[in-house]
Amino acid sequence: MESKCCVNQENVDIVREELYTDTEIAEIADLFKSLGDPTRMRIVAALRIRELCVGDLSALMEISQSGVSHQLRLLKQKRIVKSRRDGKLIMYSLDDQHVVDIIKITANHVRHEE
Amino acid sequence: MESKCCVNQENVDIVREELYTDTEIAEIADLFKSLGDPTRMRIVAALRIRELCVGDLSALMEISQSGVSHQLRLLKQKRIVKSRRDGKLIMYSLDDQHVVDIIKITANHVRHEE
DNA sequence: TGAACATATGAGCATGTATTCATATGAAAA
DNA sequence: TTTTCATATGAATACATGCTCATATGTTCA
């Protein structure tokens, strides 16, 4: 059933004016999406504490090396993590302090603190 | 190919100690997931500005009334939005200041601002 | 009460995605 | 150079999910 009848056009116009741009919305949502998976969140939470290699993360997550690697690639594309080679190992760490802040606030939120 | 050989067990143990609990990780990821969809992000960004009814949001998003309603239900379950009846309309607004803060920080982040 | 209307809900579809297996890549050590 | 080993990648699969259509629900107004 069509239901556009209840629209308050003034509200719609005002909000449309003040809204983030579509690009901004897409970027924001995209970042949240990257953090919105338990495996990736665990990876990020772990790297928050210490630089780790793929094997460490795989052991920690109890997920295949391949699975970890795939997720790390995604996180790297989004500039959430960075990597450096150390001998045979590739060491991963967080690329961005903002992300740490965002997670802290969110952690407080889910704990109903602050 | 098995590849647990490179594991630095000390690292793994230390990180495991300090990690958020599984429940916390799941809750944090779940909140990010809720915000990690462009449609829901647009809804939240709009409600940040002004309380709106379902029809307003449907007009604003150019998505069916049904689609908006489904997403609003999800956002309400996660306590991101709340609703109140006003005559025939159900008015939606944000339920949580934390969410606003999280989005602000993230918006600054994607803009590469401080 | 009954009609009209805003919103909610269920089913179904199309698309996206997290994981694993098998294998490729490439640096390091022999 | 050849082997070894950590990581990366491609394909396949199983599952999740966002959307629409059709319809139900429940409130308001005649």
Image (cartoon, coloured by chain):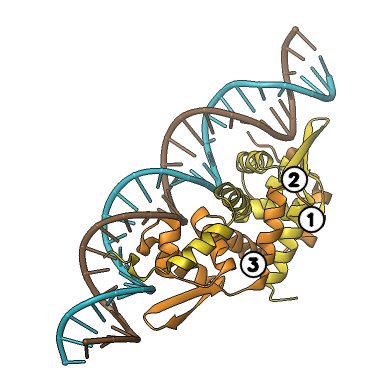
Chain colours: A yellow, B orange, C cyan, D brown
Chain identifier of the residue bearing label 1 in the image = B
Q: In the rendered view of the protein, which quadrant contains the N terminus of chain B?
A: top right
Please report, as a chain letter, where disc 2 is located. Answer: A
Question: In the figure, C1 relative to A109: above or below?
Answer: below
The residue at which mark 3 appears reads as B99
Name the one closer to the observer, B100 or D2: B100
The single residue placed furthest to the front in the displayed view is A10
* Percent of width and height locating residue A47: 77, 50
Can residue A38 be seen by looking at this rendering?
yes
- Whole-percent x, y for residue B27 in the image: 62, 66
The amino acid type found where label 2 is placed reads Asp
Amino acid identity at mark 1: Val
Q: How far apart, in angstroms, are the residues tagged by discs 1 and 3? A: 28 Å
Q: Earlier in the sequence, mark 1 or mark 3?
A: 1
Q: Is residue A84 above or below residue A94?
A: above
Give the label, 3 or 2, closer to the camera: 3
Residue under the image location 64 percent in, 51 percent down: A40
The vertical placement of B1 against A49, above or below, is above
Q: Which mark is residue A56?
A: 2
Q: Is residue A41 left or right of residue D5?
A: left
Type of amino acid at the residue the image marks with label 3: Val
Q: Secondary structure at mark 2?
A: helix
Q: Chain of mark 3?
A: B
Residue A60 appears in the rendering: no
Q: Is residue B49 above or below residue A21?
A: below
In the picture of the structure, the residue carrying the numbered disc 1 is B15
Looking at the picture, how far across and down is residue C17, in whole percent?
52, 46
